[in-house]
């Protein structure tokens, strides 16, 4: 699916988890990949090494996606290294799960900064700097549909990026740029596993039609399809990839 030869992709939060898998798959299909991270320099370097050892093209760029100057530098570095930017995957995110009365103001601000303000900042850069025919895919979450206790603020950060994307899709359509969101269910990454018992993970797995947690490999093909030429008529959409959980 999709041939990404001569395309440049920025993947935010690509040092581990879903973002890492997205970066590796784009590279396998010929794209030059910008592996963004905020603090995990060594892990991001390993992703770049893996791509280069397989004959692909990649660089890592440190940038806190909740910081406007960092996001601008991320885009400028991508253009400087690879000449143009075709695809942006808004993947970086954090999750803090607590009942609302236990959520601190700092918890709220951190999640909205890294999950939502980041998408706003990246979209602004993308609208200005993406090639015509470009693709923007934002990783939301099926929690925006599930209304699960403990996920109030996290779900709100994701619902907000879905709205941003749907409106921006109509603002950039005249340049054949598409803007979509993918809504994974629970995926087997650090973000999901941290702080959860095996019993709880099994219980959550039971909510899917396949009685298991998703793997990054379950989600990545959906993202690559939306980033492909073949997906040119799909924009402003929110696509669930959650094993039938919602
Ligand atoms: N795992 C799930 O169950 C699940 C389900 C639905 C949706 N999602 C969404 O999928 C996306 C990826 O999640 P994941 O599970 O792969 O998470 P993860 O394993 O915790 O990885 C998160 C990535 O984001 C980066 N990151 C965090 N803060 C950043 C910042 N301020 N600037 C730049 N990069 C930053 C991290 O790098 P550093 O360590 O360098 O900061 C890391 O590479 C997130 O948007 C998440 O909300 C996940």
Image (cartoon, rainbow, N blue to C red):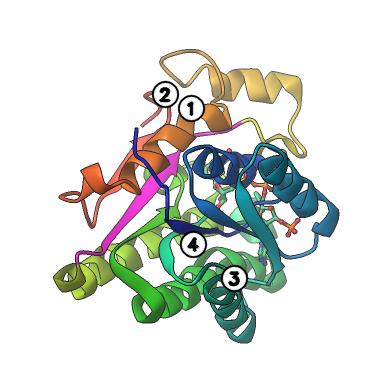
Label 3 residue SS: helix
Please state, as top left, top right, bottom left or bottom right, where the N terminus lies in the image.
Answer: top left
Q: Residue 243 bears which disc, if any?
A: 2
Q: Residue 218 bears which disc, if any?
A: 1
Kindly give the residue lying farthest to the bottom in the view shown. 69
Residue 2: x and y in percent read: 34, 39
Closer to the chain start, of discs 4 and 1, is 4
Residue positioned 56% across, 70% down in the render: 78
Q: Quick check: 211 above or below 76?
A: above
Q: Residue 81 bears which disc, if any?
A: 3
Q: Give the magenta part as a residue range.
A: 176-187
Kindly give the residue lying farthest to the front in the view shown. 55
Q: Nearer the viewer, mark 3 or mark 1?
A: 3
Label 1 residue SS: helix
Label 2 residue SS: loop
Closer to the chain start, of discs 2 and 3, is 3
Q: Residue 157 bears which disc, if any?
A: 4
Q: Between marks 4 and 1, how big is the CA–CA gap?
A: 23 Å
């Amino acid at each position: 699916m999709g041939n990404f030869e001569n395309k440049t992709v920025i993947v935010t939060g690509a040092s581990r988890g879903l973002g890492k898998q997205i970066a590796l798959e784009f590279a396998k299909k010929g794209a030059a990949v910008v592996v963004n991270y905020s603090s995990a320099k060594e892990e991001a370097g390993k992703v770049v090494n893996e791509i280069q050892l397989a004959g692909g093209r990649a660089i890592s760029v440190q940038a806190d996606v909740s910081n406007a100057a960092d996001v601008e530098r991320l885009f400028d570095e991508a253009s400087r290294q690879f000449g143009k930017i075709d695809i942006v995957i808004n993947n970086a995110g954090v999750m803090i799960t607590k009942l609302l009365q236990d959520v601190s103001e700092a918890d709220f601000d951190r999640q909205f900064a890294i999950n939502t303000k980041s998408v706003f900042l990246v979209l602004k850069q993308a609208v200005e700097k993406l090639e015509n025919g470009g693709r923007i895919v934002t990783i939301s979450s099926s929690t925006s549909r599930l209304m699960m206790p403990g996920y109030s603020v996290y779900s709100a950060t994701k619902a907000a990026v879905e709205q941003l994307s749907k409106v921006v899709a109509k603002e950039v359509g005249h340049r054949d740029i598409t803007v979509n969101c993918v809504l994974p269910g629970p995926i087997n990454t650090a973000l999901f596993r941290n702080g959860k018992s095996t019993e709880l993970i099994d219980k959550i797995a039971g909510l899917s039609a396949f009685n298991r947690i998703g793997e990054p490999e379950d989600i990545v093909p959906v993202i690559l399809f939306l980033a492909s030429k073949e997906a040119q008529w799909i924009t402003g959409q929110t696509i669930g990839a959650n094993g039938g959980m919602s």
